[in-house]
Image: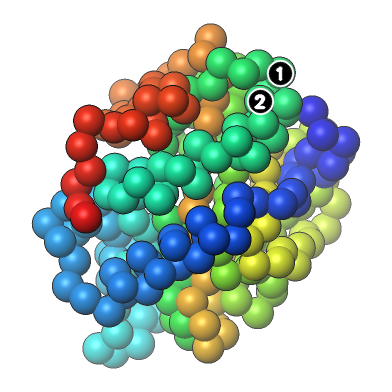
């Protein structure tokens, strides 16, 4: 496991190539400007569907935007290529001690400019959505727009995966960086009050011998990386 991940509970690394991430930004930009397809809408949580206690502030009148886009790896091959990029897989494999990885889920978390929701403090290992019995999994977060305190960047309590932890830090992540998140570290994020959207591709990879412990499943849960890159069909073009 990387020293920073073992010590603090998170690690910041280079993400997939810039050209691939540019493709993801372009796809998400088009999605924000048009009507969602049926496949997208079925996988989307809108800001208006988020509880105000989680949001951190009321939704402005007449405003709405996608907050969570589920299963992006089913919607376009660029998302699958990023989620299973060799840089991502190598970092996760090193941390988990095996190359035999399986996908649990993927999503794009989008904090809209000026009113994007906050995310309450939590530990992924205690989450009801796809934890495992031994917590031998990691989330890799690709920071498509960069992260900092002003745009609702993810905050961490370093060392909280091993004990009480230290005071909150909100690391400044460059555009295109990748953050590995230990399943037991406390983390969360404030609402986005900046003038620009903050979008992250989030992928949870786990060891093959520590399966998901709940009934929660997505259509690609349990797939090996090579199968993720070649699904039977794409839902949108």
Tell me how far mark 2 sits from mark 1, CA to CA. Answer: 6 Å
**Image point 43% across, 30% down: which residue?**
104
Of residues 1 and 27, the one drawn nearer to the viewer in this rendering:
27
**Image point 56% across, 85% down: which residue?**
194
Q: Quadrant of residue 34?
A: bottom left
Does residue 216 appear in this view? no
**Image point 39% across, 80% down: which residue?**
58
Q: Quadrant of the C terminus?
A: bottom left
**Image point 50% across, 46% down: which residue?**
82
Residue 178 position, x and y percent, is 65, 51
Residue 192 position, x and y percent, is 54, 77
The residue under label 2 is 93
The residue under label 1 is 97
Of residues 226 and 203, the one drawn nearer to the viewer in this rendering:
226
Q: Residues within 10 Å of mark 2 (few under 14, many from 20)?
A: many
Q: Quadrant of residue 159?
A: top right
Residue 31 position, x and y percent, is 29, 69
Q: Residues within 10 Å of mark 1 (few under 14, many from 20)?
A: few
Counting every numbered tag in the picture gives 2
Q: Quadrant of the N terminus?
A: top right
Of residues 62 and 237, the one drawn nearer to the viewer in this rendering:
237
Q: Secondary structure at mark 2?
A: helix
Q: Secondary structure at mark 1?
A: loop
């Amino acid at each position: 496991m990387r020293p920073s991940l073992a010590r603090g509970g998170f690690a910041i690394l280079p993400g997939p190539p810039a050209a691939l991430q540019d493709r993801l930004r372009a796809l998400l930009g088009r999605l924000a400007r048009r009507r969602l397809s049926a496949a997208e809408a079925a996988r989307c949580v809108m800001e208006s569907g988020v509880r105000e206690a989680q949001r951190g502030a009321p939704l402005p009148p007449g405003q709405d935007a996608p907050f969570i886009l589920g299963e992006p790896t089913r919607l376009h091959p660029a998302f699958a290529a990023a989620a299973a990029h060799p840089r991502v897989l190598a970092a996760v494999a090193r941390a988990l001690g095996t190359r035999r990885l399986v996908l649990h889920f993927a999503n794009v978390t989008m904090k809209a400019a000026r009113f994007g929701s906050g995310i309450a403090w939590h530990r992924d290992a205690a989450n009801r959505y796809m934890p495992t019995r031994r917590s031998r999994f990691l989330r890799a977060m690709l920071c498509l727009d960069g992260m900092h305190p002003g745009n609702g960047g993810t905050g961490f309590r370093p060392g909280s995966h091993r004990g009480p932890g230290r005071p909150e830090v909100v690391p400044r992540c460059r555009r295109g960086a990748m953050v590995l998140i230990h399943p037991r570290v406390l983390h969360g994020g404030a609402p986005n009050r900046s003038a620009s959207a903050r979008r992250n591709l989030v992928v949870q990879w786990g060891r093959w011998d520590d399966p998901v412990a709940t009934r929660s499943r997505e259509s690609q849960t349990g797939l090996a990386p090579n199968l993720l890159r070649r699904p039977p069909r794409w839902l949108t073009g």
